[in-house]
Image (tube, helix red, strand yellow):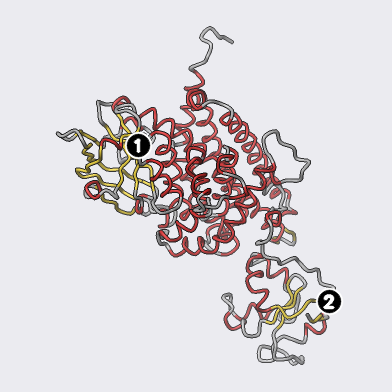
Amino acid sequence: MKTYTKEELAMHVGSRFAEDDRPSSDKMLIAIDGYVYDITKFAAMHPGGLAVLRMVAGEDATKQFYALHTKSVLEKYHDKFCVGVLAGGKKTDLKLPEKTGEDLVSLVPYAEIPLLRPKWVASPWWTDSHRAFLLDFRKTLMAFKPELEKLEKAGKYCSSELQQRVGATGILACMNGMACMGVAQKLKDEGKMSFPGGIEPKDFDLWHEYLANQEWARAVPVGVRNGMSGGMAISMPAIATFWKNSQKDSVVEQIMLGQKRSCLAISEPHAGSDVAKIVTMAKKSKCGKFYIVNGIKKWITAGMNADFFSVAVRTGGGGNKGISFLLIDISNAKTAEGVSVTHIKTSDAKTAATAWVYFDDCYVPVQNLMGKENQGFKLIMSNFNHERWLICAGVMGGVRAILQDCFLWCMQREVFGKTLMEQPVIRNKLARMIGAIESLEGYMESLTWQMSNMSHIAALTELGGPVAILKYQSTRIMTLVVDEAVQLFGGRALTASGMGKNVEMVQRTYKFASILGGSEEIMADLGVRQALLRFPRNAKL
């Protein structure tokens, strides 16, 4: 590779572009990060116009480049346009992050959870298995990321073919959690599914599930994420845990492999966080073999392409004592006749497949009852604990990614003759974000440890309130982080491309976490009400 001096570089401004009489070759060269690029042919196609390139032709344009572009842009064109190196230039490593897992660990301060920090950051719960799992999970996702980002921009539903390719890697199984790991082990043993990190599904624990959901949220665009796993991750554990049917393992297998899809259908136009107010009715047929379902569900994530709907229905009187939980399988022709869906346009991409779901004399076999009739409310609440914890894991992944972008941007962006990072007010903003994220991480890990060391029954009775408070605090912190990030990125935080695209996506969609699975206000109230159950009645100041 040729080495260019600054004087040699200055000779290449492109004779047809030169605006003075200095001698020049026909080539237009620039230097970025110590590498020299021939942009002669590219100049006419430059999205920012030719004039911008004329201003830096024959010069080291590193500062100007990073004021407008991310490093990924340079990586994209490096092999195609690089013709040499600049003498005395400081070269940046441009190896694409597709090597071993350790190459994927960010060195940006606080961009990674403690598990991926230097070995001196000790932890009582993280193991080498967890680290290997996270790094391999991240590496597997990197192979899909360009395709997933393209799908998000295209505004299309996720294809069955893509769902199955992702399912074959074990990623979808990880999203479904420990309730499904027996079936996952069977699929792995049969060679139908691989699994991240070299671990066996039978050794998968709650920490692995936390890492999988956090990393999924960190790397995958929100619309694609919701469409591929959002409905599945909150419906499948209920199917695996509560459905006592000989077909259960077969259904779980198909969903984990991406051959079929599932979603949770609880919310209605008249009932969101107040589940006890649902009105979708399910009455027994005269023959007693079917429930006949009539009603409407709204805001059903992944409902547009679901094959299985885990549905809350009213089978008894008012309130929470008359609710049951049904699995509605539209692969059954008789059942499918009574189900229709319509897309709802929301703040995230169409890929989320959010739907109205209409049940019109939908015949559901009585064998598809999950749990006992009129006792579905307890099952739904149990499922909510897991759903809310998953939302918190996703929030952790999202805020870490945004913090990383903010650090990088503040080191690159110059205002009033200084980088943003040199401004005390900017460092103060970053400190607020770091303190909030680090404290939330500690809270999340502490509660996860409790969940992983309690019996299922104990967790149901003891952790409903704490999980509600965790969700409330998670979404409040996300609000803080997103607000500060928007101020740091300015107009770029409102632009769905370029350096602020990640911030733009999050600031447009972060309120989903604040509302879904129980709104912040409901979570705060639930947490305090649960605490009051143990309040010592004689206690006085």
Say which residue appears at 78% left-offset and 69% top-offset.
91
Please provide percent x and percent y for residue 504: 53, 56
Closer to the eye: label 2 or 1: 1
User: Left or right: where does residue 196 sit relative to residue 272?
Assistant: right
Quarter of the image for residue 515 reads top left
Q: CA distance from mark 2 to mark 1?
A: 71 Å
Q: Amino acid at mark 2?
A: Ala
The residue lying toward the viewer, choosing from 190 and 415, is 190
Q: If the image is split into quadrants, where does the N terminus sit?
A: bottom right
Quarter of the image for residue 12 reads bottom right
Please provide percent x and percent y for residue 503: 56, 55
Residue extending furthest toward the top = 538
Q: Residues within 10 Å of mark 2 (few under 14, many from 20)?
A: some
Q: If the image is split into quadrants, where does the C terminus sit?
A: top right
User: Left or right: where does residue 458 sit relative to residue 138?
Assistant: left
Say which residue appears at 69% left-offset and 82% top-offset.
38
The residue lying toward the viewer, choosing from 435 and 369, is 369
Residue extending furthest toward the front = 190
Picture disc at residue 245: 1
Please provide percent x and percent y for residue 203: 59, 39
User: Left or right: where does residue 466 sit relative to residue 349?
Assistant: right
Label 1 element class: loop
* Mark found first going from the N terminus, 2 or 1: 2
Residue extending furthest toward the left = 286
Vertical placement of residue 417 versus 84, above or below = above
The residue lying toward the viewer, choosing from 56 and 12, is 12
The residue lying toward the viewer, choosing from 400 and 79, is 79
Picture disc at residue 87: 2
